[in-house]
Amino acid sequence: MNATEILAGAALGVSGIALYLSIMAAWPQIKEWAESMRDLVLWIALVSVVGGIGYLGWTHYEAQRRNATAPRSTPGEFETSATNWQR
């Protein structure tokens, strides 16, 4: 499983919990508690999913930056460059 699949599964699971808490809010005795728990679950989901997407984006950006700055030369290239410089 890659990180995208884990984030998608977490988002699906948390949305299922939020739906269950919304259905529980139909009973007047536990309405306030269920609404507050639902809001808490949704805020945690928002922060974790957005944070996870940000983390994945940052690691992807860092990997591209590292690959872009890595030297891409062959040993023969250095010899040719040094020979051309001495001429």
Image: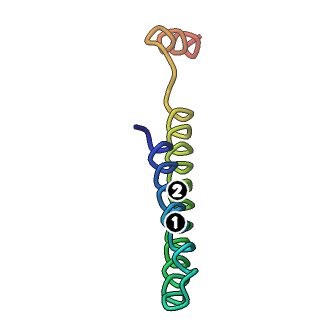
Q: Which residue is mark 1?
A: 45
Where 75 sits versus 46, above or below?
Answer: above
Please tell me how crowded label 2 is: few (under 14), some (14-19), or many (20+) other residues with Cα within 10 Å. Answer: some
Residue 34 position within the rendered picture, expressed as x and y whole percent measured from the top left: 50, 82
Q: Position of residue 3 (x, y in %)?
A: 45, 44
Residue 56 place in picture, x, y as percent: 51, 49
Please give the label number shown on residue 30: none
- Amino acid type, mark 2: Ala
The quadrant in which the N terminus is found is top left
Secondary structure beneath label 1 = helix
22 and 3: which is toward the camera = 22
How many residues crowd around disc 1 within 10 Å: few (fewer than 14), some, or many (20 or more)?
many
Q: Position of residue 68 (x, y in %)?
A: 57, 33
Say whether disc 1 or disc 2 marks the residue closer to the N-terminus.
2
Q: How is the image coloured?
A: rainbow
The residue identified by callout 2 is 11
Residue 54 sits in quarter? bottom right
How far apart, in angstroms, are the residues tagged by discs 1 and 2?
7 Å
Label 2 sits on a secondary structure element that is helix
Amino acid under label 1?
A: Ala
| Quadrant the C terminus occupies | top right
In the image: residue 2, left or right of residue 49: left
Q: Residue at x 52, y 48 (%)?
A: 8
Residue in the picture at 53% in, 68% down? 18
Q: Is residue 66 above or below residue 85?
A: below
| Residue in the picture at 44% in, 47% down | 6
- Residue at the extreme left: 1
Count of marks overlaid on the render: 2
Query: Who's the residue at 47% across and 8% down the image?
Result: 76
